[in-house]
Amino acid sequence: MKIALVFAFAIVLTQAEPASAPPAATPLATASGPVYWGKQAARLTLDSRPLGFDSDGNARWLVVTKYWDADGKPTRVMAASKVNWTSPDGYVQWQTRLAYGQPAAILKATRAGVLTMTAHSTNPSFPPITLQTDTRTWRGPRVVAKPIGPHVVQIGWFPRETDVARVVRTDGAGRRKTIGIVAGPSSTYRDATVQPLRHYRYVVYRTNREAVRLGPVFTPAAPPPTAVVNAGGKGMWLWFTANPLDKLYFKHLDPGQIVAQAVRARLHYVELRVAYGAYWEITPEAKPTIDAVIDGLAAHGIGTLGWTVPRDTMFDDVAASVRCAYYRTAKGTRFTGLAVDVERGDEFMGGDPQKLDALWMYVEYVRQALGPEYLVAANVEDPYLEHLDGRKYPYRQIARFVSVLQPMAYWRMMVRHPTAPEEVKRLLSGSYRTLRAYSHRNVPISIGGQTAAEGRNGAPPAAEITASLEESKHLGAIGEIFFAWEGTQPDQWDAIGRFDW
């Protein structure tokens, strides 16, 4: 889908846990297409390791590519490579390029025994390689319980139970209760009846297996309440990467300049991307820079919502979004809410085994975990411009669990011809009214507008930015947020700044 393409380049380059030092001081573009940190790849090998068993009831197996040059020295692909990952044994999710130092994937399986995964590097081109592992040789607990947030504990068991699983909970006062009887096939149970700052112990009973006693599990404190008004008025999406080759590399950000521009534009808030899937993008190296942005905005009364891009409904991914409610800068500044980008497509939720249901299930899990008092906005696909309805996108279900809906009404990207101010008003009116009808609930709406030059028609001129703000306010939206900071031109910033909201 077109919206997915907006993020694809950034996602490929966003990275991660510190990897080994690059083998060369400067990147080298080669005739084969990929950009290397080192020389052109002449050979491919694979590394793998078990990641253990999780509270989704999965065995998690990591496989990482390793490229070598003609001299047998390691070289790293920094951009433009392509690796296809396949397995007959479970759900395979490719990982962000630098999360493990190179292209990688994680296999999540619910059955015990031999697992296989095949990696086929097509750019640079090498023959497919297949690896195997056997979960019966892995160490570590196979029944796991962890809190997602103050109101949910998730319990997983491996391998998948084909008959019946029973979950018994004992609270801090010693009260014992059966909280779940789960018919097979099953591998997990979410206890959404827990309270913040409590200890719980669990026992999992499965057919023809010994009972497994877990605990204690300690639930965190509830985050401070945040208000819907934090996602009102004028906003802007802002993102960064951890790849030094990218122009949005975090070290290239100027916090003072960002804050000054936000003040001139009279923004009320910024949505800052902090997680892609299960990966937390504010690395220790990036934290001082990103904290300076958050603190600087807060000093001028401008809030920052943590913006996350989910990829599946698994525990680690949901926990990354929940983490926003607990993040603090070194000075103690918190996010003023959470914005969850629920989209279809391979870069987003398209790979989740729950398919379309994953979109609303994700926001339900986040809401369960954080409780009703925390601001959760959902960036949703635009029903009018994308010709969607409730059969193609679960607007009604998502609206049940969120505080604010933000339709991505990128008008110049979605239409086939250049637009004019009056047409922008007509398009946004269609977007707002259609979303209101499909949501079946009076959820506040903040229009997602466009400043970036995405699509065949280029960037909207200042007159269209003004028209979009006028119409959004006229329709009854609580605000308008623009995609995205990178690419917003001076005349567009001026138009945003002149408009009172």
Image (cartoon, helix red, strand yellow):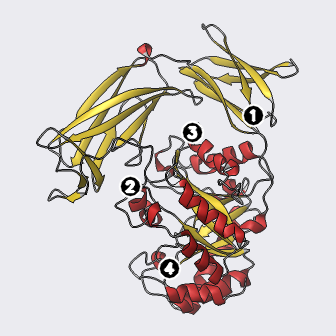
Residues under labels 2 and 4: Cα distance? Answer: 22 Å
Quadrant housing residue 54? top right
Name the residue carrying label 4.
Answer: 488
Amino acid type of disc 3?
Asp
Name the residue carrying label 2.
Answer: 12
Amino acid type of disc 2?
Val
The numbered mark, 3 or 1, whose residue comes first in the sequence reads 1
Residue occupying image coordinates x 29% and y 34%: 118
| Image x and y of residue 403, in percent | 74, 60
Up-down relation of residue 130 to residue 214 (above or below) = below
Residue occupying image coordinates x 78% and y 40%: 221
Residue pushed farthest left?
A: 70
Q: Are marks 4 and 3 in contact (CB under 8 Å)?
A: no
- Residue 26 located left or right of residue 499: left
Q: Are marks 1 and 2 in contact (CB under 8 Å)?
A: no
Q: Is residue 297 visible?
A: yes
| Image x and y of residue 59, in percent | 48, 26
Residues under labels 4 and 3: Cα distance? Answer: 33 Å
Amino acid type of disc 1?
Thr
- The crowd level at tag 1 (other Cα within 10 Å; few <14, some 14-19, many 20+) is many
Up-down relation of residue 301 to residue 193 (above or below) = below
- The crowd level at tag 3 (other Cα within 10 Å; few <14, some 14-19, many 20+) is some
Name the residue carrying label 1.
Answer: 219
Q: How many marks?
A: 4
Residue occupying image coordinates x 49% and y 88%: 419
Name the residue carrying label 3.
Answer: 316
- Residue 495 located left or right of residue 489: right
| Image x and y of residue 423, in percent | 56, 88
